[in-house]
Image (cartoon, rainbow, N blue to C red):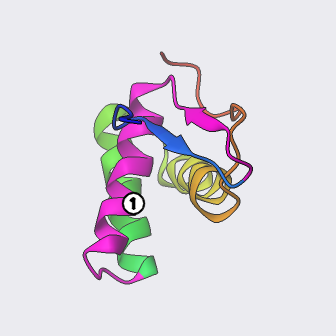
Amino acid sequence: MVRAPHQRRAGDGAVSIIARRCERAVVTAYRELREAGTDDLSAFRACTTLYRVHHPEASVAEARRLVAEWVDHHVVRAAAGPTQGCACD
């Protein structure tokens, strides 16, 4: 089955669909950086910067919290459900 880049198979076999563009961009970037051999902290920092490009009004602390939440939810736990995330679409 061919999936769009924003659809990933979760650990329980369900397909995770990420609706927010910024969340999808962050999770995709994190996965691709890690697959390319980038260490975890560098990938996390890059994704925090990426989030702030989408949301320049966000503080560094807020960006770090959201990126950590999204990476944990989509990558570490491979959960299929939605995250609380940010208020954008």
* 51 displayed left or right of 84: left
Identify the residue at horizontal 54%, vertical 57% (top origin). 64
Q: Amino acid at mark 1?
A: Tyr
Foreground of the two, 44 or 62: 44
Q: Quadrant of residue 5?
A: top left
Which residue sits at x=41%, y=35%?
6
Decide: is 20 above or below 1. Answer: above
Q: Can residue 58 be seen in this snapshot?
A: no
Residue 10: % across, % down? 63, 48
Q: Residue at x 65, y 54 (%)?
A: 78
Q: Nearer the viewer, residue 11 or 19?
A: 11
Q: Which residue is mark 1?
A: 30
Q: Residue at x 68, y 46 (%)?
A: 13
- Tell me if 80 is positioned left or right of 31 in this view: right
What percent of the width, then of the height, locates residue 47? 37, 56
Going by the image, does 42 lie left or right of 18?
left
Q: Callout 1: few (<14), some (14-19), or many (20+) C-alpha neighbours within 10 Å?
A: many
Residue 61 in the image: state x and y as whole percent.
Answer: 56, 55
- Please identify the quarter of the rendering in which residue 4 is found: top left
Q: Is residue 88 magenta?
A: no
Quadrant placement of the N terminus: top left
Residue range (magenta): 12-39
Looking at the picture, does residue 88 appear above or below residue 18? above
